Amino acid sequence: MEYIKGFTFGWGAKQGDFNKSEAKESLRLMKERTASNYVIFALAAKQETAFSTDVIYEGEHIVSDDELREMIDYAREIDLKIMLKPTVNPSDGTWRAHINFFDLDVPCEPKWKDWFASYTAYQMHYAKIAEEKQVEMFIAGCEMVQTERREREWRQLINDLRTVYNGLITYNTDKYQEANVKWWDAVDVISSSGYYPLGDWDNQLDRIETIIKPYNKPFFFAEAGCPSRAGSSQIPNAWTLEGAVDLEEQKRFYEDMLERTSKRNWVKGFGLWDWKAVLYPEEEAHLDKDYAVFGKPAEETIRAFYEKK
C-alpha cells in the first residue's frame, strides 16, 4: 500500500457547509500547504444518547449527499485521493466509545441488534456513495470501543459493505485498543488513532507492531494529532484540556511522532486530525489552541515530512 499523506477534513460540518466557497478553498490550501495526497471526509451522524439505537444521518447536522459528492469531485480535480469515514456521536456530548448495550437481550431495554441494524443502514448508505465515486478507502467506524467486542456483528457489517463497495475497507480503533479488535482479519487495512504522549512513541509502536504482525495487513494511523496548548503533548487526546496557547509544543509533538514512525516501515501513513472546512483567518493562528495546524509551526513540520515521502 502506498504511503498515506493525509488529513481529516470537515469534521462536524453541517448541511450547507461544503457548499460554501470557503470549504473548497480550505481543501485547496490543505493540499497545497501540507503536501497531502489523501483527504478523509469524516461525517458526523448522531444518536440521542449512548444507549439509543437510532443513528440519524439525515438533517441539518450533517452535509447533504449532493454537497458531499460535489466536494469529492473537487478533491479529484485537485488530485487528491479520498477516504470516506461515516462516524457517529451521541447528541448529549457522550463520546461514541461509550455506546453500549446489554450483551443479553432484555425486554424493554435497548438492544445491540437494533443499534447495529441502524448503524449498518448508515454505513451502507455512504458505502454506496463511496462506490459511485470510486473512493479509495472506506473507514467503517471510529473509536467505537464498547462495540468492538461484538465480533459477529462487525464481521457481518463488513461483509454487507463488500456487497456494495469494492474498495479497501478499514476500521479505526482507538488509541491503546489495537488488541481489543479480534476481527482484524475481516478488513483490508488496520488503522488506529495515534494520540500517544511525546516521548512514548517508541514504546507504543513496539506494542502495536506485536499486535498487528500476525495479521500481515497494511497499517496506518487514521487519526493522529495534538492541540496547540500547554500540556497537550502529554495527553494529546484530551480535547478539553485547559491551558494557554503553545504553538511550539504542538510542533514538538509532531516532530517526535513523525520521526519515530518514519523508522517503522510498517506504518503506512496518517490521516492527521484535523483540517476545518472553514478556516480561521491565518493572522489569528497564534490565538487558536485546537488541533488545527493551519498557519502554525506544525504545518511546516508536516509539509516537510510529507514532501519527503
Image (cartoon, rainbow, N blue to C red):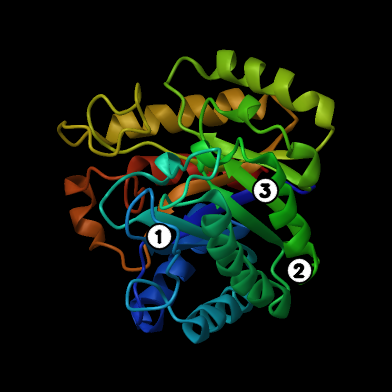
Mark 3–mark 1 distance (CA, rounded to whole Å): 24 Å
What kind of element bears circle 1?
loop
Q: Nearer the viewer, residue 15 or 242?
A: 15
Q: How crowded is the residue under tag 2: few (<14 C-alpha within 10 Å), some, or many (20+)?
A: many
Q: Is residue 147 above or below residue 85?
A: above
The percent coordinates of residue 4 (x first, y second) are: 66, 49
Q: Quadrant of residue 98?
A: top left
Residue at the spot x=38%, y=49% of the render?
A: 51
Q: Nearer the viewer, residue 57 or 239?
A: 57
Residue at the spot x=71%, y=22% of the render?
A: 211
Circle 2 residue: 165
Q: Nearer the viewer, mark 3 or mark 1?
A: 3
Q: Is residue 24 above or below residue 45?
A: below
Residue at the spot x=42%, y=76% of the render?
A: 63
Of labels 2 and 3, earlier in sequence is 3
Residue 303 visible: no
Three-letter amino acid code of the residue under disc 1: Trp
Task: Name the side, left or right, on which 67 lies relative to 123.
Answer: left
Three-letter amino acid code of the residue under disc 3: Trp
Task: Name the side, left or right, on which 246 lies relative to 309.
Answer: left
Circle 3 residue: 154
